[in-house]
Structures are given as structure tokens and as C-alpha cells.
Image: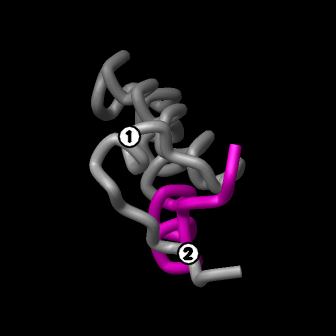
Amino acid sequence: MQCNVGGIDRTLRIVIGALLIVLAIVGVIGSWGWIGILPLATGIFRFCPAYPLLGIKTCKKD
């Protein structure tokens, strides 16, 4: 897996994913908030499986 998620994109994914999970834990948004695991994981691992299919790469060139 090659890095394809850049800095701002990564930060937003981690923050939004964590927020969704926390809201699901406290019961504000219900169980669908666990979908936050996906953006959290893609932010942590810096790889989004959909990006290669769409031809997107937000990280800087190596």
C-alpha cells in the first residue's frame, strides 16, 4: 500500500472518525456512528482504497 492520503486530508479523517465514534459511544447519533472507524483507519494508515480507483492522491510526491 502506497501512501495516498495527505496531511490535511489525514487530519480531517482522524478528527471526523473519532468524533463519530465518540458520538456513537455516548448515544447521541446511534449505532451508525461506528462508520467513523473507516475514516479513522484510512487517516491512521494514510491509505484510502477508493483513491486509486478515482485517480486521487492528496499526499505530496516522494
Q: What range is drawn magenta here?
A: 1-15
- Of residues 56 and 18, the one nearer the viewer is 56
Cα separation between marks 2 and 1: 15 Å
Q: Residue at x 36, y 61 (%)?
A: 56
Instruction: Determine whether, in the image, residue 15 is placed left or right of residue 23.
Output: right
Q: Earlier in the sequence, mark 2 or mark 1?
A: 1
For the view shown, which residue lies furthest in the top direction? Answer: 31
Q: Position of residue 36 (x, y in %)?
A: 45, 36
Instruction: Name the amino acid, label 2.
Output: Cys
- Of residues 32 and 40, the one nearer the viewer is 40
Residue under label 1: 50
- Of residues 43 and 19, the one nearer the viewer is 43
Q: Position of residue 11 (x, y in %)?
A: 55, 70
* Quadrant in which the C terminus is drawn: bottom right
Instruction: Determine whether, in the image, residue 16 is placed left or right of residue 42.
Output: left
Residue 30 location, quadrant: top left
For label 1, the SS is helix
Q: Residues within 10 Å of mark 2 (few under 14, many from 20)?
A: some
Q: Is residue 43 above or below residue 40?
A: below
Instruction: Determine whether, in the image, residue 56 is placed left or right of residue 57.
Output: left
Q: Residue at x 56, y 57 (%)?
A: 14
Q: Position of residue 37 (x, y in %)?
A: 53, 32
Residue under label 2: 59
